[in-house]
Image (cartoon, rainbow, N blue to C red):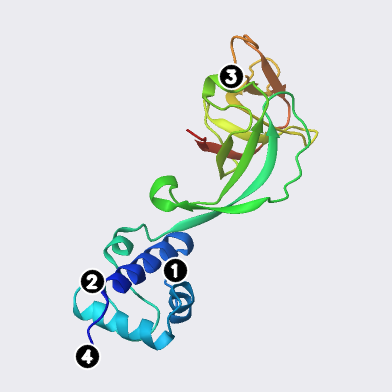
Amino acid sequence: MRSKSPELMDKIKTVVDQYYSDNSAFPSMGDISNELGISRTTAYRYLIAMDEQGMLEYNGTGRKIVTRKVRKAPTGVALAPILGSIPCGTPEEEEENAELYVRLPVSLFGRGEFFILRASGDSMTDARIEDGDLVVIKRQTTAEVGDIVAALDENGSSTLKKYGGIDEETHAAILLYQNQERYPGKRILVKELTVQGVAKKVLVDL
């Protein structure tokens, strides 16, 4: 077999790693050839040679190409739609039209159904949720006292607040502001609360 270029081998491995990272799937021969400007036959022959040299695992059929990086990568991802803004001040209407979908690794976020909301307002700063932050919400209909919930009130208006349990006098659900400097002790009483989900993580730029 004609000797193979080590530089091209490294490039093929990089393409496989990046494709898997971006798509959680293995690239086809066409994907590799298009990315590197080589023929599919060349890509195939290089993969066979790289398998023989222990650089990766490829059995000559299908699309499964396993590099060291791919082997260590998490096997599961969840697709979470970004549904736009949700108020962190007074409740406002929110249309659930997905801006785009984000891939969330199961190893970091766990299993379940998720969606992402863009926070607006300043009522949740003590919970480290700032205006414009993306908040990852696990979709569920129940919440524990102390959870940060995405919820609907009896008028169908949405808000993001800390769940404070049930008020003993009115039997209404308590939603708490989390900005003591600006809204000391402020809360909302909701007679008919519909929990849409519970906040799990905040995605922010460093």
Q: Earlier in the sequence, mark 1 or mark 4?
A: 4
Q: CA distance from mark 4 to mark 2?
A: 17 Å
Q: Are marks 2 and 1 in contact (CB under 8 Å)?
A: no
Q: Is residue 141 left or right of residue 7?
A: right
SS type, badge 2:
loop
Instruction: Give the image location of residue 71, x and y in percent.
Output: 29, 63
Instruction: Give the image location of residue 181, x and y in percent.
Output: 60, 9
Q: Amino acid at mark 1?
A: Ala
SS type, badge 3:
loop
Q: Earlier in the sequence, mark 3 or mark 4?
A: 4
Q: Which mark is residue 1?
A: 4
Q: Amino acid at mark 3?
A: Gln
Q: Residues within 10 Å of mark 1 (few under 14, many from 20)?
A: some
- Return the residue at label 1: 25
Q: Nearer the viewer, residue 19 or 161?
A: 19
Q: Residue furthest bottom?
A: 1
Q: Residue furthest right?
A: 155
Q: CA distance from mark 2 to mark 1?
A: 19 Å
Q: CA distance from mark 3 to mark 1?
A: 41 Å
- Return the residue at label 3: 178
- Return the residue at label 2: 55
Q: Amino acid at mark 4?
A: Met
Q: Is residue 84 left or right of residue 199?
A: right
Q: Amino acid at mark 2?
A: Met
Q: Quadrant of the N terminus?
A: bottom left
Question: Residue at 80% across / 33% down in the picture?
Answer: 155
Q: CA distance from mark 1 to mark 4?
A: 30 Å
Q: Based on the displayed image, in which of its 4 quarters is residue 158 positioned?
A: top right
Question: Residue at 32% across / 73% down in the picture?
Answer: 8
Question: Residue at 48% across / 80% down in the picture?
Answer: 30
